[in-house]
Amino acid sequence: MTLIIFMQLIDSGYCNEDESKAQAATESKPTGTQTSKDVAGESDNDDPLRAMQRLAIEEQTASWGHWGDQPEKYGTWDQHSNRLVPIYTFGITLDDLRAEGSAYTNPERLKQIYGHVPKGTLNPTALYFDQTDIYRLQKAALDAGYTNIILMVFDGMDWQTTQATSLYKQHRYNSGRGTGLSFQDDRRVGTDFGLICTSPKSEILKFDVDAQTVLDWNGETTGGYDASRGGEAPWFEQSNRNYLLGKDREQPHTVTDSAASATSMMSGHKTYNAAINVLVDGTQVTPIGRSLQADENFKVGVVTSVPITHATVACTYANNVTRKDYQDIGRDLLGLPSAAHRNEPLQGVDVLLGGGWGEHKDADTIQGTNFLPGNPYLHEEDIHRADIQHGGKYVVAQRAAGKSGKQHLMKAAKKAVEEDQRLLGFFGTTRGHLPFQTADGQFNPTVDIKEQETYTQADIEENPTLAEMTRAALLVLEQAVDGFWLLVEAGDIDWANHANNVDNAIGAVLSGDEAFRVVLDWVDENDAWQHTAVIVTADHGHYLVIDDADRFVEAGKQATEATAKRKQD
């Protein structure tokens, strides 16, 4: 049977090389923001959400909302939050977890998760689950006879980001599951909804990347969740926003990054921020997809819209003391010798599709002494060794000038099927991710607190979309005799929220929603619901605050009208 888990839990504060710790982004305005024509002379007059984003950055205030704990300023927080995040299931329910009760009501279970009961974390009325329950849910599905697992992570998508997207689609709600998006509204199979706590076991620890050892664990757990400060559900107004941002001195529970959260979901263990399936004491643990490959002969696939060796992807398969050892993570994913598996390389995943193409670094000390100058995410030499044309196991499709990304990837996928080989797809544009889709379906991001991106027509045409990569992955994985496990990550939601860019964030959610429809359509087309379960969730939240829902609704309405007019013209 097929368990599909959509985890678009987009990457953490450690996700970008140039990301600093939390800081106010208002000291200076981004350059080039004093005009309404900021992308190749393109006006945002017929794109009201794009105009809302641009003006908010220019003026550093917006009546409709803001990021962070300073309502008078638009963009002041570029890191994660301790918000509870949503989980949606399809083909399976959360009933067994509900019957068991939340771990946050049970001191013994909290001790198993965190090592002790963190201050303020025990809550007799808790209805929310823990991220380790996502791992347990997958195990339960397998025990029930499901044979294929697809995990979709909307990285960085908290309840408020989803609500903003639904408002833009002209659907209003103030609590619960919501409506307006496919993963909220699809009822072709039984579905369920719940909330997840994302706190890690510890903040980032010191490590030796060459020796792959953890150096300074002192037994102090810094994670936990205090509902009296953070809220029993994300739609309740928070009385202490500093707490949710990890800034409350009285209750400074650590905010998770994508590595710790993904390790929880895929291996069932809490750990420190930046760890890739490595525990606080340095012990390596095995993620569920890898164990299924080794023990049950499952195929394993990974799809992402961001660099191919970022944290969420890494946790599907690799081990490493740091999420930033990208090249070694890539070697684990491709079944090559790595710092963590020098003498006995892992088998490697069966499908690996994502971004990172075209990037270059001459040096990177955090990746250790075996770092090779070249692509920092997936080195050219490792791709060469993995390619079937050079004795490897993968049909390789990389971004190529003049070639349609969709067609190029699908051709490679069909060849992998015909020749019973694995598939590696390596694409990307600025900073290694796929082009950002904005809320109205275009690819024309405007300014934010990071670096504004612009794309050529080639950038758009030579890269597949997340939905197209998902379709290619399923073509290969559906050939599995015994079953498969697949992760689909909408990682660009996280990047957009880090940049305080509401236009990009909504566009990224809609891009992930399209990939979700591809998955459910695939299940229908293959009459596979009898052995398919789908889970959609996130790895952590950010901190968008919506102050005027009407502005989002009106922006969506105007954009729809403008699109219809363009089609008529």
Image (tube, helix red, strand yellow):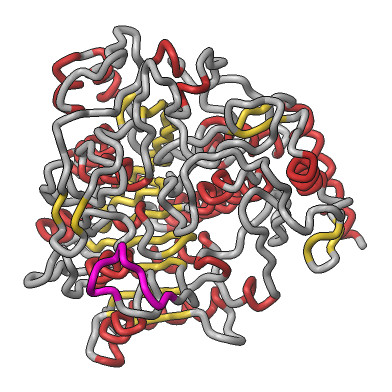
Residue 226 seen by the camera = yes
Looking at this rendering, what residue extends furthest in the right direction? 569
275 relative to 357, above or below: above
Looking at this rendering, what residue extends furthest in the bottom direction? 390
Residue displayed at 20% across by 72% down: 335
Q: Is residue 366 magenta?
A: yes
Q: Is residue 37 magenta?
A: no
Residues shaded magenta: 361-371
Q: Quadrant location of the C terminus?
A: bottom right
- Front-lying residue, 328 or 102: 328
The percent coordinates of residue 409 (x first, y second) are: 47, 76
Task: Quadrant for residue 482, please give it.
Answer: bottom left
Prevalent SS, magenta region? loop
The percent coordinates of residue 304 (x first, y second) are: 44, 59
The percent coordinates of residue 5 (x first, y second) are: 36, 45
- Front-lying residue, 82 or 422: 82
- Front-lying residue, 40 or 407: 40
- Front-lying residue, 279 or 295: 279
Looking at this rendering, what residue extends furthest in the front direction? 27
Residue 154 seen by the camera = no
Looking at this rendering, what residue extends furthest in the left direction? 343
Q: Is residue 75 left or right of residue 420?
A: right
The percent coordinates of residue 100 (x first, y second) are: 22, 19
Q: Is residue 47 left or right of residue 93?
A: right
25 relative to 330, above or below: above
